[in-house]
Amino acid sequence: MTASGYKALEEEINLLKNVERHAVIAMIAEARAHGDLSENAEYHAAKERQSFIEGRVIELEDQIGRADVIDVSKLSGATVKFGATVTLVDVDTNEERKYQIVGDFEAQPKNGRISISSPIARAIIGKSVGDTVEVAAPGGARSYEVLKVQWI
């Protein structure tokens, strides 16, 4: 995982532990004050939210514990590998796309951050500027040419 992905996980854990936990405890206390818990929808919703928060904290702590953080700014090279920001051009439409290859948990395709296990990333790993790759996409196979490999 990249350093920015690691930082995002730490921030989410911090938010869940220091803000969300306290808010849900207050919600549970308020719902208890309303009386009969067996038919108290607010109480059950708050307990469900508490369960979600605790489960998410456990999941994030596990991810952080197993993380291998890679500082992308210290990487270099002409071939595509983890952490690279790659500019591709669609051979058919001449549309340019820019992607950074990141870990599975930090992927945000809409923001140009694709998972190392995604079909596009798997196709371009090990390629260099000028290489053409074919990627199996839901709408059919697409061909891309690698225009630029950067280490940002």
Image (cartoon, helix red, strand yellow):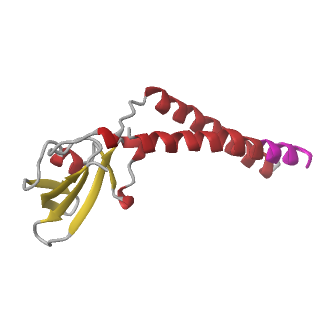
Q: Is residue 34 magenta?
A: yes
- Quarter of the image that includes the N terminus: top left
In the picture as drawn, the residue positioned furthest to the top comes out as: 65
Residue 134 placed where, x, y %?
A: 11, 55
Residue 64 placed where, x, y %?
A: 49, 32
User: Relative to 89, is 75 on the left or the right?
Assistant: right
From this view, report whether residue 47 is shown above or below residue 138: above
In the picture as drawn, the residue positioned furthest to the left comes out as: 131
From this view, report whether residue 101 is shown above or below residue 140: above
Residue lying at 41% horizontally and 45% vertically, measured from the top left: 106
Q: Main secondary structure of the magenta part?
A: helix
User: Relative to 91, is 54 on the left or the right?
Assistant: right
Residue lying at 21% horizontally and 67% vertically, measured from the top left: 96
Residue 32 placed where, x, y %?
A: 88, 43
Q: 89 or 33: nearer the eye?
A: 89
Q: Is residue 8 magenta?
A: no
Please state the total of marks drawn on the protein image.
Answer: 0
Q: 75 or 53: nearer the eye?
A: 75
User: Relative to 78, is 110 on the left or the right?
Assistant: right
Residue lying at 14% horizontally and 42% vertically, measured from the top left: 126
Residue 124 placed where, x, y %?
A: 16, 48
Q: Over which residues does the magenta segment extend?
A: 25-37
From this view, report whether residue 80 is shown above or below residue 112: above
User: Relative to 52, is 47 on the left or the right?
Assistant: right
Residue lying at 68% horizontally and 45% vertically, measured from the top left: 49
